[in-house]
Image (spheres, rainbow, N blue to C red):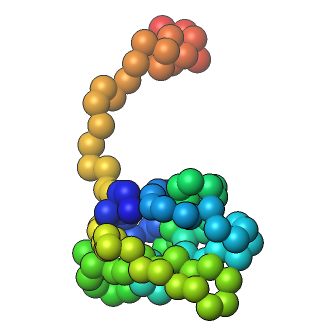
Amino acid sequence: VFPIRGPKVGGTVLTITGMHLNTASKEDLQIMVGDVPCRVESFGEQITCKLSEYVGDTVPSPHLNVRVRYGKYTTTFTDTAFQFSNNPSVSDHQPRSSFIWSVLFARKYAI
């Protein structure tokens, strides 16, 4: 499983690699990270899925098992666990303006 951590808000695309992953069909496949669903995006020799939001209180989360379920009766757990971390927070940015911004500002205010 890659990556092994992502933000609590979700949206991380997991890539799951292994052998014989293209068994059954995409519709029969369910992937969960702990109790968090991971919506299958691609299915074949490797599987990609997009994580939903983690609603647990503890961040970073415990290391959560990745469960791959085929149909009703076949469930496999990966050797790699996933961990939800704090959401990114932007505290500053540089530069504060750009050439395009300066040109637009000058036109608007006729500087």
Q: Residue 40's spot in the image, x, y percent?
A: 62, 65
Q: Is residue 7 left or right of residue 71?
A: left
Q: Quadrant of residue 85?
A: bottom left
Which residue: 56% across, 64% down? 21
Q: Is residue 75 above or below residue 11?
A: below
The residue closer to the viewer here, 3 or 20, is 20
The residue closer to the viewer here, 3 or 16, is 16
Q: Residue 110's spot in the image, x, y percent?
A: 55, 9
**Can see residue 59?**
no
The single residue placed furthest to the bottom in the displayed view is: 73
Q: Residue 108's spot in the image, x, y percent?
A: 58, 17
The residue closer to the viewer here, 68 or 18, is 18
The single residue placed furthest to the front in the displayed view is: 20
Which residue: 33% across, 29% down? 96
Q: Residue 105's spot in the image, x, y percent?
A: 50, 18
Q: Is residue 13 above or below residue 28?
A: above
Which quadrant, please, contains the N terminus? bottom left
Q: Quadrant of residue 23?
A: bottom right
The residue closer to the viewer here, 9 or 108, is 9
Q: Quadrant of residue 25?
A: bottom right
Q: Is residue 60 left or right of residue 41?
A: left
Q: How many marks?
A: 0
Which residue: 31% across, 56% down? 89
**Can see residue 108?**
yes
